[in-house]
Image: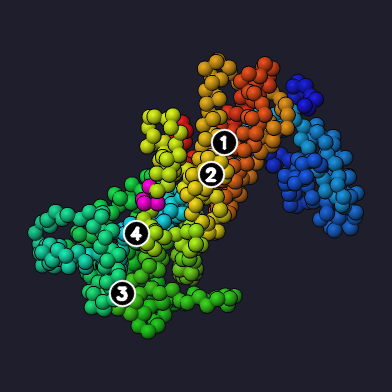
Amino acid sequence: MYSFTIFDKIVLDGDIMKDFYKLLHEKIKNALDKTEYCDEQIVVSESNRRDLGEYQYNGAMNLAKKYHKNPNDIAKEIVDYLKEDSFFLSVSVASPGFINMTISPVALVEVLNSQTFNYEKKEETIFLDYGGANVAKSLHVGHLRSANIGEALNRLCKFLGYNTISDTHLGDWGRPLGLVILELSKRYPEWSYFNPNYDGIYEDVPITNNLLEEIYPYASNKAKEDEKYLKEAQEMTKRLQNNEKGIIDLWYKIMDISKTDIKKIYDRLNANFDLYKGESDAEKYVPELLSYLDNLDIVIESDGAKVIPVKEESDKLEIPPMLLVKSDGGILYSTTELATIYERIKNYQPDEIWYIVDKRQSLHFTQVFRASKKANITPNTNLVFAGFGTMNGSDGKPFKTRDGGVMRLTDLLDIVKDECLKRLNPNIVDNRDEIAEKIAMSAVKYADLLPNRESDYIFDIEKFCDLEGKTGPFILYSTIRMKSLLNKAKENNITYQKMYLIDNEYDKEVVLLLNNLDSVLNKAFNSKSLNDITDYLYKLTTSYNRFYTENIILKETNELKRESWLYLTNKVYEVNKLLLDILAIQIPEKM
Ligand code: ARG
């Protein structure tokens, strides 16, 4: 129990506090200003020795070098000034000059009561490229991370006040589509779409998503074995790229069917895109891009192809030139990529473009980004490749179906859903399916966002769906329990306005963790990785659960305590809700 009265109120200077660390930072700066020392980079961190203090400032060691003095003496001088501030309960020096600070519980309470979650609107626009589904092919597990990480980063940017534009960048052009259309022409040669001289109205055709999903792998394998078929596919791709009327019409049909299916999966993952553009949209800008590039001295001929050399002296690995136009005049993934940048700059003028794509595509992006810089297409735009690692099977290799094939994303989501349905509390009778779906998505998403963006991880359905441990279901369950406590308070007409006091080490730990919210969000933003958020959610939730187990909240007879605890519960509930929403995880009504 801390001894202080709730009446010795501490006035926090300046604005309503959002970032606790900024406040701490200022306190140290104020103390330093009274000394002869100047630290340009004040860093305050959580202490890893809680017994000595909650926060740490280690600047005295650097100042000692700068001012040729003993770090202990410098630290002591700073501490003398810090001690004058009632914000601190205690401040002390540990050899050779660490400053340990413990915050006054009164101050902690004040900070908590004034905490807001609003960020100022910012000028910058961040364009996010994620999703990356391919038309006429089913989404596979490789597309999972792009959707999850991308959507969460998009929501994080928005929350921090940035303008964002999100685009799926569909793979809807070129070879794969040529293959699919060729195979359709083999199976249904009578369709008028394939007759270049036809000028009537095209008939309805029985294309379904299942048919497309069957056709693509078939045609792709056949082209590998059968040279004649491959040639024909190339021919068909050309006819598509030359905008032959019937072929384009058929392509639109394929696009429609495929997009509907793609959207269904993205809906399940709660991924929303402002734009459903794709390679085909960029293709329209290729002639303009090529003539723009022709006026620059950067495109060279190589074996009949047009390429942009992009290697730099400091390269440790050989970076081959970016292929712009093939010797047969065809264009490639890199061509539409560069044209997409060209188009995005023209139409949206983003300050940054973030690509959330499998890290195995890093060479492609290095080439395209360098070409774009060289061609001065992006003088004011920062191009960022945020590559991610793979989801692997228990063998440590990219996740496969039992028979060794690539698993469709829908199938994977269904497997997880079945598992969650099986584990669902039998007392829940209504909406079982809907609830299991939400829990399943939380399991998949949380597990997907838990490792650092660049790390690989292993798919482990038992672990992901577990109610205990670092899992989506655990966070959801605990969050729902907070809500039900708050509901009970409401039913009993117990209201809570603010926090009055910190009573014990458990509520204190929760309050301290809440102070980290802003730095967690900013860390995630800077690293473009969600692991800081998933980690924090777990820490905050477990710390809250400990507090919940140690204290009987609703039955507490001391009103100030009870109100404080309910207020704290509500705060944690709000933070959990906010963070789950950033991760695009939905909370079911019950579990
Ligand atoms: N469709 C591509 C694939 O499945 C991913 C697209 C990523 N985005 C991009 N701008 N290239 O591999």
Q: Nearer the viewer, mark 4 or mark 2?
A: 2
Name the residue beneath numbered marker 4.
Answer: 134
Looking at marks 4 and 3 on the same chain, the residue that comes earlier in the sequence is marked by: 4
Q: Quadrant of residue 222?
A: bottom left
Q: Which tag is nearer the camera, tag 1 or tag 3?
A: 3
Q: Which mark is residue 65?
A: none
State yes or no: discs 3 and 2 in contact (Cβ < 8 Å).
Answer: no
Disc 4 versus disc 1: distance between alpha carbons? 36 Å
Mark 4: amino acid: Asn
For marks 1 and 3 on the same chain, the one whose residue lies earlier in the sequence? 3
* Residue under pointer 3: 224
Three-letter residue code for mark 2? Thr
4 or 3: mark nearer the eye: 3
Residue for badge 2:
471
Compute the Cα span from label 4 to label 3. Answer: 20 Å
Tell me if residue 412 is in the magenta stretch: yes
Whether residue 260 is situated above or below residue 188 in the rendered picture: above
Place of residue 294 in the rendered image (x, y in percent of width and height, measured from the top left) = 38, 74
The disc labelled 3 sits on which kind of residue?
A: Lys
Mark 1 surroundings within 10 Å by alpha-carbon count, few (fewer than 14), some (14 through 19), many (20 or more): some
Give me the C-alpha separation between circle 2 and circle 1: 17 Å
* Residue 575 circle label: 1
As drawn, is 412 to the left or to the right of 527?
left
User: Mark 4 CB in 8 Å range of ligand 1?
Assistant: yes
